[in-house]
Amino acid sequence: MYVLGLESTAHTFGVGITDGKDILSNVRDTYLPERGGIIPSKAAEHHYSLASKLIEKALSESGLKLKDIDVIAFSQGPGIFAPLKVSFQVAKYISEKFNKKMIGVNHCIAHLEIARKFTGFQDPVMLYVSGGNTQVITFEDGYYRIFGETQDIGVGNLLDKVGRLFEIKFPAGPEIERIAKRGKRYIEMPYSIKGMDVSLSGIETFIKRIKNSYRIEDILFSLQETVFSMLIEASERAIAYCGKDSFVITGGVAANKRLNEMGEKMCEERKTKFKSIPMEYAGDNGAMIAYTGFLMKDYQQNDLKPKTNFRTDEVKIEYR
Ligand code: AMP
Ligand code: MG
């Protein structure tokens, strides 16, 4: 049985195919604004214009035809409405025209499931860090529960905003990581962690103020050190509290080597298992939607509309 997954919650249109065991293809294209942040209508246009080409590419890479596909899974939310509805509409079209089952997948849960798949960890504490989301999550009693989260903006969003202050193009994360490697001097920045929640927007305000007083490499180095320490501290508390034996980091910011290094070190010290996920599956991708669609293939869903505020802890997990 084969599942084709479509991702379109924000900047990336992705198509993945799985048989439930292996990822047979994972293709994508990301909308890159000329300057500034994502313009929703432009992202949607980008996704519509590439949808059929990317679906064909995914099918040909996996050596399959549309008739071989059993289930069409799509990213149901959370996300930005205009791009979000592209995967819904494309999935609906294929599902009606070719008579395929349609499954709506929570995008955050897809990031968690692909991390579990690639680490082999059954029941880890998960730090989910992407553009719009920053959450510490564990599975308890049929649901993915949020133990801690950002009280304002997502960590990727913070990196992208700080990037803009220095004219680094979206997505700024990879370039910030490169520049931060040359940083030597630590500049103290607002460190705001309350219980297991973190607050990040104060850092952007702070950097705006001090931006002309320090070297860019020291600012970006200190930014990474400060923010990642907060996230790892919140994760460590969740691990201690829940007594889980493993930890993973997932989402676009999980591509960052320094963040993974800090996660690994924390785990070493407390004898918790840690593994990084392959970079290809850190950021938004269609394979994670396909794989989670496979896990959910027997769900009977009666509300398939896009949900911009779809919460991680809304979905009853019936396959675990
Ligand atoms: P996602 O929405 O899950 O695809 O994540 C996108 C976010 O990940 C963007 O805000 C990027 O700036 C961020 N990102 C991508 N690569 C890196 C990296 N190497 N280090 C830090 N952030 C990154
Ligand atoms: Mg994401």
Image (spheres, rainbow, N blue to C red):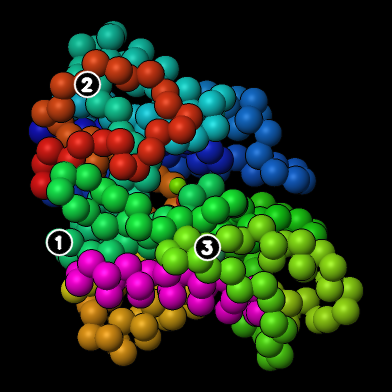
Say whether mark 2 is within 8 Å of ligand 2: no
Alpha-carbon neighbours of circle 1 within 10 Å: few (<14), some, or many (≥20)?
A: few
Residue with the most extreme top position: 97
- Amino acid type of the residue that numbered disc 1 sits on in the rendered structure: Gln
Q: Residue 173 placed where, x, y %?
A: 60, 62
Q: From the viewer's perspective, is 199 left or right of 64?
A: right
Q: Residue 285 placed where, x, y %?
A: 40, 45
According to the picture, the residue beneath numbered tag 3 turns out to be: 198
Looking at the rendered structure, the secondary structure element under dot 3 is: strand
Question: Which mark is first along the chain, 1 or 3?
Answer: 1
- Amino acid type of the residue that numbered disc 2 sits on in the rendered structure: Gln
- Vertical position of residue 217 compared to residue 163: above or below: below
- Vertical position of residue 297 compared to residue 263: above or below: above
Q: Nearer the viewer, residue 209 or 161?
A: 209
Assign the magenta stretch its main secondary structure.
helix
Nearer the observer: mark 3 or 2; the answer is: 3
Q: Nearer the viewer, residue 232 or 20?
A: 232
- Give the Cα distance between marks 2 and 1: 26 Å
Confirm or deny contact between disc 3 and disc 2 (CB under 8 A). no
Image quadrant occupied by the N terminus: top left
Q: Residue at x 36, y 83 (%)?
A: 266
Alpha-carbon neighbours of circle 3 within 10 Å: few (<14), some, or many (≥20)?
A: many
Q: Residue at x 69, y 66 (%)?
A: 203
- Amino acid type of the residue that numbered disc 3 sits on in the rendered structure: Val
According to the picture, the residue beneath numbered tag 1 turns out to be: 122
Q: From the viewer's perspective, is 104 left or right of 80?
A: left
Looking at the rendered structure, the secondary structure element under dot 1 is: loop
- Vertical position of residue 57 compared to residue 223: above or below: above
Examine the structure image and report whether residue 222 is included in the region drawn in magenta: yes
Q: From the viewer's perspective, is 236 left or right of 201?
A: left
Q: Residue 246 placed where, x, y %?
A: 22, 72
